[in-house]
Amino acid sequence: MELGIITDEVHKDFAVACEHAARWGLPLVEVRNVDGKNVVLLDDAEAEAAAATVERLGLRVSAIASPVFKSPLDEKGEAGAVDFTVAGAVTVEDQLELLERSCALAKRFGTRLVRVFTFLRVPATDEVLAAVAAHMARAAAVAARHDVVLAVENEHACVVGTGAELGRFFAHLDRVMDPALAPHVGALWDPGNALAAGEERPYPGDYEALPKDRLVHVHLKDLGAERASFGSFVPLGRGRIDYRGQFEALRRDGYAGSLVLEPHYAPEGMDPVAAAEECVRAARQVLAASGVAT
């Protein structure tokens, strides 16, 4: 396993964020925003410059953290209190166009992983999960054409918010997707998002419900308060999630992918770079206590 961080969690300036990641000895960065612009909106010259920065610093990109399918499932529906759609891409066809761009960017940044979501939150009934799975099967065909892997994230603002819901989603997906496309869709496990979605024990309970044979990526965040808010996030090991047990279980289950910090840790008055560095140190301490080498 290798440790990394999403760059805009360190600094808005992409080059500055990458320089800090390299100084901290991280081998990986994940790309979500570049200089304040969502990654899918970068033009070719901007993408080329960002990729050159990564290469110059000896870093590698773990994934393109795209916003694909963080949009209403019902195209007539409301986006909710926060509009997560990008560039007015509300329809599924719009989202698939964003996916095409995301896959092309993955190639340029030298990664095979593209993070995707499962549409904005409505109750995860079997009917809803079947609809999400049908759209994801179409997305899998796009991924296969580009030879990339979709990392489907559990996200508290989306239909699939917990590990158990990820498990149910993949069961639906396997019913409708061509089996030949299965290698192009995997699970992205975020214990912090599961906690924010209402799961009291992301590890061990919710983790055990994951389709672990489909696990391709992991995001890391921890919460210290009962409700998720940008004031409640804390460095790993100081919150409600048993990350030591989680890391031990990942090692036991043979997970060999990336562990990418998305800490959302922003204490009032604290420099964001210092906050991110504190999160890197805390993660390394928990990993060491778990006997997991990174």
Image: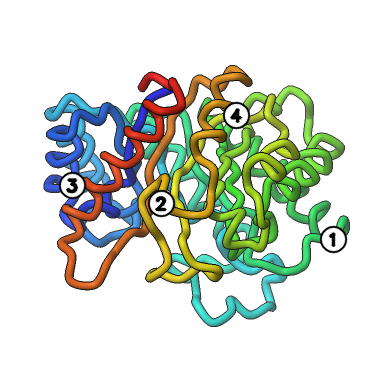
Q: Earlier in the sequence, mark 3 or mark 4?
A: 3
Amino acid under label 4? Ala
Q: Residue 117 appears at what percent x and percent y?
A: 58, 52
Q: Where does label 2 land, which residue? A: 238
CA–CA distance between discs 1 and 3?
A: 40 Å
Q: Nearer the viewer, residue 61 or 177?
A: 61
Q: Is residue 52 in sight in this rendering?
A: no
Q: Earlier in the sequence, mark 2 or mark 4?
A: 4
In this rendering, the answer to whether 202 lies above or below 293 is below
Tag of residue 144: 4
Amino acid under label 2? Arg
Q: Nearer the viewer, residue 131 or 283?
A: 283
For label 2, the SS is loop
Amino acid under label 3? Ala
Quadrant into which the N terminus falls: top left
Q: Earlier in the sequence, mark 1 or mark 3?
A: 3
Assess whether mark 4 and mark 2 are in contact (beta carbons under 8 angstroms): no
Q: Where does label 3 land, which residue? A: 17
Q: Residue 100 appears at what percent x and percent y?
A: 49, 44
User: Would you say 13 lies left or right of 111 here?
Assistant: left
Q: Earlier in the sequence, mark 2 or mark 3?
A: 3
